[in-house]
Image (tube, helix red, strand yellow):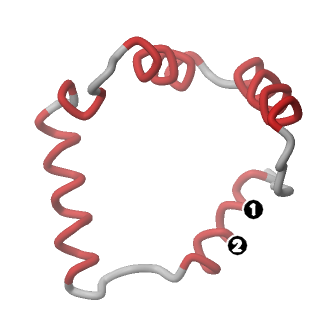
């Protein structure tokens, strides 16, 4: 994704992405906008997954950003 600095262009890009989003993503975005404290309403399973991720990061069990972006780009182009 190219970097966008103009607010109007960011809004347009977001609108385009929402139009393409699946139902789960739209619901997530809606819930984020409707909730002042979204992290206060996460499921115990999601909270546990976040904690596992933090523990893995603390142990150095991470994938470099460049590698993740490469895989994401490959996945998105399918």
Mark 2–mark 1 contact, CB under 8 Å? Answer: yes
Seen at 70% across and 22% down, the residue is: 18
Q: Is residue 4 left or right of residue 54?
A: right
Q: Assign a secondary structure to mark 2.
A: helix
In the rendered image, the vertical position of residue 66 relative to residue 73, given as above or below: below
Residue 15 image point, x, y percent? 77, 21
Quarter location, residue 12:
top right
Q: Is residue 68 left or right of residue 17?
A: left
Query: In the rendering, which numbered label is found on residue 58?
Result: none
Quarter location, residue 72:
bottom right
Seen at 14% across and 49% down, the residue is: 48
Q: Is residue 48 left or right of residue 72?
A: left
Q: Assign a secondary structure to mark 1.
A: helix
- Residue at the spot of label 1: 73
Quarter location, residue 39:
top left
Q: Spatial distance from mark 2 to mark 1, Cα to Cα?
A: 5 Å
How many marks the image carries: the answer is: 2
Q: Is residue 3 left or right of residue 32?
A: right
Seen at 49% across and 14% down, the residue is: 30
Residue 32 image point, x, y percent? 42, 23
Seen at 81% across and 55% down, the residue is: 1
Residue 20 image point, x, y percent? 76, 24
**Mark 1, residues whose alpha carbon is within 10 Å: few (<14), some, or many (≥20)?**
few
Residue 49 image point, x, y percent? 22, 52
**Mark 2, residues whose alpha carbon is within 10 Å: few (<14), some, or many (≥20)?**
few
- Residue at the spot of label 2: 70
In the rendered image, the vertical position of residue 78 relative to residue 73, given as above or below: above
């Amino acid at each position: 994704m190219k970097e966008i600095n103009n607010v109007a262009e960011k809004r347009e890009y977001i609108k385009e992405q929402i139009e393409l989003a699946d139902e789960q993503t739209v619901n997530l975005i809606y819930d984020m906008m409707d909730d002042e404290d979204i992290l206060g309403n996460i499921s115990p399973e999601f909270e546990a997954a976040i904690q596992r991720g933090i523990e893995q990061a603390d142990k150095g069990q991470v994938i470099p950003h460049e590698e993740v972006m490469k895989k994401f780009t490959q996945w998105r182009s399918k």
